[in-house]
């Protein structure tokens, strides 16, 4: 971005303002907006005007009964006042994304002005990266900046298609996007060792490619959450009614064999907090993870697992965490995830580099109050996973080509 001459330019910028809203359409977590503010201020300080693009939710998949877009629910206008407060200046709102109104309002911008366009996903052409739609977006600005790492894995018009219409000197990454890439590269390209990856979540099927890739990169992989029981059963353990993907037992063993061949140590929870039903008020007890009785299910890692995982983290110099280690939304089954958050923060304070990625992991680190005590909290989610899997992200490729 620093190579671009912004003075008196209209800057078309893609951000990720896909923030959660309550029933009154009030923002409940503005992290993604606040993370983009330094980029917006940098460009404005250089004497430019801003034309902001973002999506909000999935309006195409959540249409009204008559088949129309629910504009009231998914309009970006819900965010206008909040962005104005954070930027300390008026933000104009355009009820269109492309076309006459958007072109007229962008043409009238002068240095220091900010215009927020309507939700890019109101248009089916966005997800199709439609060339005509991309060209109409391009017509709004003189230069293009992508600061939306969270959507960089999408080959959409506003994240990749439009960038192809700008020359190399007319496009670049925003400060947040560059920071996201730099921090992911610390894990991918130059990790200090030992390097430990903590991978949680419900299903092995969601994390196959990531696990396969990490076996080539990490020294230790801690596996928790529902996916741990597929690995435990694959090794002959009894997992009761715990979540288990029986179709992936052979694959789990293949991953374990690959890890052994690569001299990577896989750590599964020795014990679990088990419950007699999936309910916040369920009866619960501690069980060995490979001896869970029928009628009981593992919903969190147990005290021995917490202590064992902590020992691994204490010896680590690089830590990647993606996915909760239990059903942390239920207080009764949150201890393993929250304890791990504290242990990651403690290891960071002792000199380890820690990258927290994925929506649930970010929620967990926030809930534990450790956000400021880890090295970097990614806004990426799916984009970070795709990048860590070693794939090229369309939103990155379009800027570099």
Image (cartoon, rainbow, N blue to C red):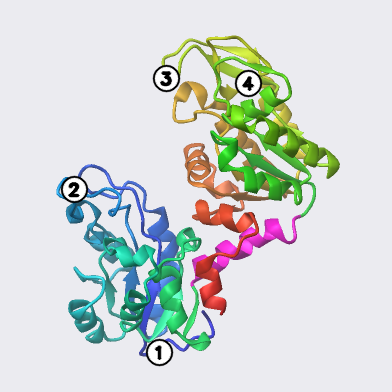
Residue 96 locus on image (x, y percent) = 21, 70
* Image side of residue 387 versus residue 276, left or right: right
Q: Is residue 183 above or below residue 338?
A: below
State the image quarter where residue 75 is shown. Answer: bottom left
As measured in the structure, the alpha-carbon distance from the residue carrying label 1 to the one carrying label 4 is 58 Å
Q: Is residue 312 above or below residue 144?
A: above
Q: In terms of sequence position, does the residue under pointer 2 or pointer 3 come before the other?
A: 2
Residue receiving disc 1: 7
Q: Secondary structure at mark 4?
A: loop
* Image side of residue 303 versus residue 170, left or right: right
Q: In terms of sequence position, does the residue under pointer 4 or pointer 3 come before the other?
A: 3
Residue 168 locus on image (x, y percent) = 52, 85
Dot 3 and dot 1 residues touching (CB under 8 Å): no
**Magenta run includes residue 112:** no
Closer to the observer: label 3 or label 1? 3
Residue 104 locus on image (x, y percent) = 19, 83
Q: Which residues are magenta?
A: 174-191
Residue receiving disc 3: 280
As measured in the structure, the alpha-carbon distance from the residue carrying label 4 to the one carrying label 2 is 45 Å
Q: Is residue 195 above or below residue 121?
A: above
How many numbered tags mark residues here? Answer: 4
Q: Secondary structure at mark 3?
A: loop
Residue receiving disc 4: 302
**Mark on residue 64?**
2
**Closer to the camera, 88 or 34?**
34
């Amino acid at each position: 971005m620093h190579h671009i001459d912004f003075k008196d330019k209209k800057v078309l910028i893609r951000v990720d303002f896909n923030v959660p809203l309550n029933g009154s359409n009030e923002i409940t977590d503005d992290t993604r907006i606040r993370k983009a503010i330094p980029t917006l201020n940098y460009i404005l300080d250089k004497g430019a005007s801003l034309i902001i693009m973002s999506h909000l939710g999935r309006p195409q998949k959540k249409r009204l009964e008559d088949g129309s877009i629910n504009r009231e629910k998914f309009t970006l206008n819900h965010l206008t006042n909040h962005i104005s407060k954070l930027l300390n200046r008026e933000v104009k709102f355009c009820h269109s994304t492309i076309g006459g109104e958007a072109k007229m309002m962008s043409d009238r911008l002068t240095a220091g002005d900010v215009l927020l366009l309507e939700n890019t996903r109101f248009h089916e052409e966005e997800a199709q990266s439609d060339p005509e739609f991309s060209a109409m977006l391009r017509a709004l600005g003189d230069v293009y900046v992508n600061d939306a790492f969270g959507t960089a894995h999408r080959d959409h018009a506003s994240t990749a298609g439009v960038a192809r219409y700008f020359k190399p000197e007319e496009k670049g990454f925003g400060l947040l996007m560059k920071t996201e890439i730099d921090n992911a590269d610390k894990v991918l390209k130059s990790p200090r060792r030992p390097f430990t990856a903590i991978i949680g979540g419900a299903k092995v099927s969601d994390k196959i490619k990531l696990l396969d890739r990490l076996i080539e990169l990490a020294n230790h992989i801690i596996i928790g959450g529902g996916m741990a029981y597929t690995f435990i059963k694959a090794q002959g353990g009894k997992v009761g009614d715990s979540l288990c993907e029986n179709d992936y037992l052979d694959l789990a063993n293949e991953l374990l064999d690959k890890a052994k061949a690569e001299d990577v140590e896989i750590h599964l929870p020795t014990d679990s907090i088990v419950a007699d039903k999936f309910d916040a008020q369920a009866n619960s007890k501690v069980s060995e993870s490979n001896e869970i009785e029928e009628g009981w299910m593992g919903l969190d890692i147990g005290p021995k697992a917490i202590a064992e995982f902590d020992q691994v983290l204490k010896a680590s110099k690089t830590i990647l965490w993606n996915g909760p280690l239990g059903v942390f939304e239920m207080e009764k089954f949150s201890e393993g995830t929250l304890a791990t958050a504290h242990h990651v923060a403690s290891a960071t304070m002792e000199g380890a580099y820690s990258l927290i990625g994925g929506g649930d992991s970010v929620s967990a680190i926030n809930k534990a109050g450790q956000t400021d005590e880890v090295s970097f909290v990614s806004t990426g989610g799916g984009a970070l996973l795709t990048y860590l899997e070693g794939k090229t992200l369309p939103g990155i490729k379009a800027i570099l080509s």
